[in-house]
Amino acid sequence: MSTDRSTLADVPGLIRVENTTPEQLAAHCTKMTGETYPHQQVYGQYCTIEAFVDCPPELVYDYLRQGHHLEEWTCSLRQFTPTGTPGLWAGRDLLEPGTDIYCRVVAHPEAMTVDYHCAWDQGDKLWMIYLMRVIPAASVLDRPGSVITWTNCRHPYYETNPYPDRAPSPDRRWVGDYWDLFYAGHTVEMNNLKAILEHRHRSGLPVSVPPAAAVKR
């Protein structure tokens, strides 16, 4: 199968072998490659982290798709209970006193993606979306286990609270105030996730636990 290259003729800025020699491409890529990068350049608009976990991907996916496990591996999400809306859970984010967080899990078993659609203070618009994917390490690293990727996008609401009237107090810090710490904070949580999964798998314990046996609320 081939494409009609004439459809690209009017697209400005393309770099392809049709208009660039391998030497020019290598020089261009070298120019783009730095020894160090500012934090804002790497994590200012998108924050992606990844980790290898010594646990079968099917078990990792099954653990992540069950939202109550957020109470185990996240630093501050606790006390989740179902709301009156099917699939929507409400809990507390102990990062800030009195803060409610709402969450819906959207999971796709064939692709092993698990997305947490969340929001502080209200469950009508879930705009804080945590995108996670489980990848069989056998296919990408030629070893048993899993690779987990986790991406956040800087939604405009991170800049300004769209529902200030629903905050528990006027002086409560907004979740977007923590954006510059997302890489570090999410890395701490990814390390928690890795530790729990590997410990249970290596110890021959069930990786997933029922809600009643989850970390004490």
Image: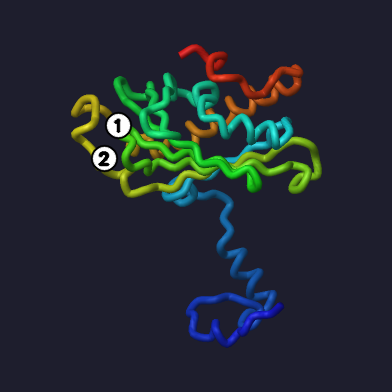
Which one is nearer the viewer's eye here, 200 or 160?
200
Does residue 56 sit above or below 7 in this rendering? above
SS at circle 1:
loop
- Contact between marks 1 and 2 (CB within 8 A): the answer is yes
Q: Could you tell me if residue 191 is visible in this image?
A: yes
Instruction: Check disc 1: other Cα within 10 Å, few if <14, some if 14-19, many if 20+.
Output: many
Location of residue 217 (image quadrant) = top left
Q: Residue at x 69, y 25 (%)?
A: 198
The numbered disc on residue 134 is: none
Give the quadrant of the N terminus. Answer: bottom right
Mark identifier at residue 121: 1
Label number found at residue 161: 2
Closer-to-camera residue (161/84) = 84
User: Where's residue 187, x and y in %?
Assistant: 54, 33
Q: Is residue 195 shown above or below 102?
A: above
Q: Which of pointers 1 and 2 indicates the residue nearer the eye?
A: 1
What is the total number of numbered labels drawn onto the structure image?
2
- First along the sequence among labels 1 and 2: 1
Residue type for callout 1? Asp
Residue 2 percent location from the top left of the image: 69, 80
Amino acid carrying label 2: it is Asn
Residue 193, relative to residue 179: is it above or below? above
Q: Name the residue at 63% across, 39% down.
A: 148
Figure quadrant of residue 82? top left
Say if 18 sits above or below 205 in the image.
below
Instruction: Please tell me which residue lies in front, 208 or 73.
Output: 208
Is residue 61 left or right of 38 when viewed as pictured? right
Name the secondary structure under disc 2: loop
Q: Residue 105: x percent and y percent?
A: 49, 37
Q: CA distance from mark 1 to mark 2?
A: 10 Å
**Residue 150 appears anywhere in the view:** no
Residue count near mark 2 (Cα–Cα under 10 Å), binned few <14, some 14–19, many ≥20: some
